[in-house]
Amino acid sequence: MANTASAKKAVRKIERRTTVNRARRSRMRTFVRKVEEAIASGDATLAAAALQSAVPEMMRAAQKGVIHKNTASRKVSRLSARVKALSAKG
């Protein structure tokens, strides 16, 4: 357990940041899941629209330090390729 005043303050700050980061990560995952569901349904226009709203959400999470920048870029790239393949197929 934290003994010093600064350690106690650090614990409080970490709690607040954790709450914010958890919400941000959850929000990002929700947007990604919407893209995945649109791809699974086979609707290219819906998938493209979902991807367009998911990309800023992922990049914002990377900018805020919730996920690594390269992780966000990789996820965007892979989702984009799947959406592109879906629209080319249909």
Image (cartoon, rainbow, N blue to C red):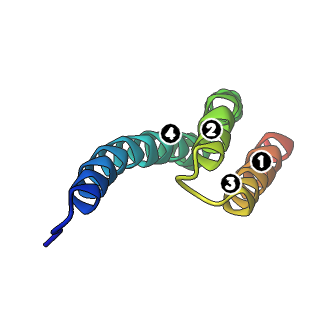
Mark nearest the camera among 4 and 3 is 3
Q: Quadrant of residue 4?
A: bottom left
- The x and y percentages for residue 22 are 36, 49
Of marks 3 and 1, the one in the foreground = 3
Pointer 4 with pointer 3, Cβ within 8 A: no
Quadrant (top left, top right, bottom left, bottom right) of the C terminus:
top right
Mark before the other along the chain sequence, 1 or 4 = 4
Q: CA distance from mark 2 to mark 4?
A: 17 Å
Mark 4 or mark 3: which comes first in sequence?
4
For label 2, the crowd category at 10 Å Cα-Cα, with few meaning under 14, some 14 to 19 and many 20 or more, is: some
Q: Are marks 1 and 4 in contact (CB under 8 Å)?
A: no
- Between 65 and 14, which is closer to the camera in this rendering? 14
Q: In this figure, what is the number of numbered marks?
A: 4
Whole-Å distance between the Cαs marked 2 and 3?
9 Å
Residue beneath label 4, please? 34
* Dot 2 amino acid type: Arg
What residue lies at 32% left-to-right and 54% top-to-bottom? 14
Task: From the viewer's side, name the closer residue of 74 and 47.
Answer: 74
Q: Earlier in the sequence, mark 1 or mark 2?
A: 2
Q: Which residue is mark 2?
A: 60
Q: Mark 2, mark 4: which one is toward the viewer?
A: 2
Cα distance between the residues tagged 1 and 2: 17 Å
Q: Residue at x 50, y 39 (%)?
A: 34
Q: Which residue is mark 1?
A: 80
Quarter assignment of residue 52? top right
Q: Which residue is mark 3?
A: 72
Disc 1 marks a residue whose amino acid type is Ser
Location of residue 36 with respect to 6 vertically, above or below: above
Q: Work out how far the residue at label 4 is from the one at label 3, CA to CA, in angstroms.
A: 16 Å
Residue at figure coordinates x 68%, y 54% from the top left: 72
